[in-house]
Image (cartoon, rainbow, N blue to C red):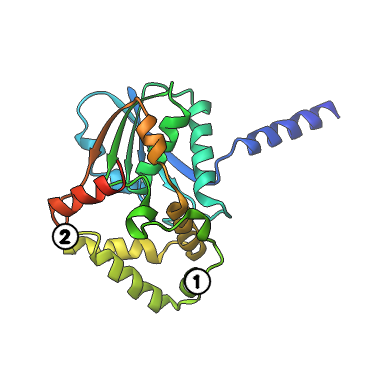
Amino acid sequence: MKVILGVLFLFITNFAFSQTAISVTTSGTGKPIIFLPGFTSPGSIWDETIPNLEGNYESHVVSYAGFNGLKPIGTPWYSTIKAQLVAYVKNEKLSNITLVGHSMGGNLAIDLASELKDHISGLILVESIPCMRELMMPGVPASSLQYDSPYNNQVLSMSDEEFKQMALGMAQNMTNDTSKIGLLTEWSVIADRETYVYGYTDLLKLDLRTSLSELETETLILGASFPNKEITQSNYENTRI
């Protein structure tokens, strides 16, 4: 009986620390860098970046539940991902970390740096706005955004072809490299539909402007000059980065 109980306890312990909201692949040795992709993007988006690093680094590349074929989770989606990333850093005993985040990944980087101040040494935020809602719908309070909304229900009820056309239209506004439009579209198409809809609601409700302004971590913010530098600079200034 003691042996059975011991095995059962071990199983429960391992299950409690399992990661269901994130998948992490590691490579290299040295100072840890955690790479956080944007919404719908797989961790492999960093495959062209990592080989160009000069120095000794241990890369931790994150992918999110519901995207790139990974099993979806329920709601809340974003906060569950954040919690499991915090647990990952602590369980792996990582320190002196550089966080590199694109778009939504930049939001996660800010969140992690705020909660794990003693573990983080630097942030690189790529095309990341701390409050997307303020840019897309100025003045709209987070409390007005709900999972059960006419827009969300409309997207959930779209046929596969209707959704693909919507994703294509969005992808065309995300890059000036036409060869990448098909790939961006495909990432949205293969995403779990509820993750896509409800996860985006989570992001729109997010406001990290205060968290970012209070960080003392050395931070580099990169923004593409698309469609032009003036508009990009205005977007960042208007969201108080």
Q: Nearer the viewer, residue 97 or 226?
A: 226
> Disc 1 designates what residue?
156
Q: Secondary structure at mark 1?
A: helix
Q: Quadrant of the N terminus?
A: top right
Instruction: Give how far across and how far down residue 156 sits, in percent.
Output: 50, 71
Q: Nearer the viewer, residue 49 or 154?
A: 154
Residue 41 can be seen, yes or no: no
Quadrant housing residue 7: top right
161 above or below 194?
A: below
| Labels 2 and 1: the sequence-earlier one | 1
Mark 2: give few (<14), some (14-19) or many (20+) Cα within 10 Å. Answer: few
> Disc 2 designates what residue?
177
Q: Quadrant of the C terminus?
A: top left
162 above or below 126?
A: below
Quadrant housing residue 186: bottom left
Q: Residue at x 80, y 32 (%)?
A: 4
Q: Secondary structure at mark 2?
A: loop
Label 2 to label 1: alpha-carbon separation: 29 Å
Left or right of 6 in this view: 148 = left
Instruction: Give how far across and how far down residue 46 sits, in percent.
Output: 29, 44
Q: Amino acid at mark 2?
A: Asp
Residue at the front extreme, as displayed: 139
Instruction: Give how far across and how far down residue 43 sits, in percent.
Output: 36, 46
Q: Residue at x 41, y 31 (%)?
A: 113
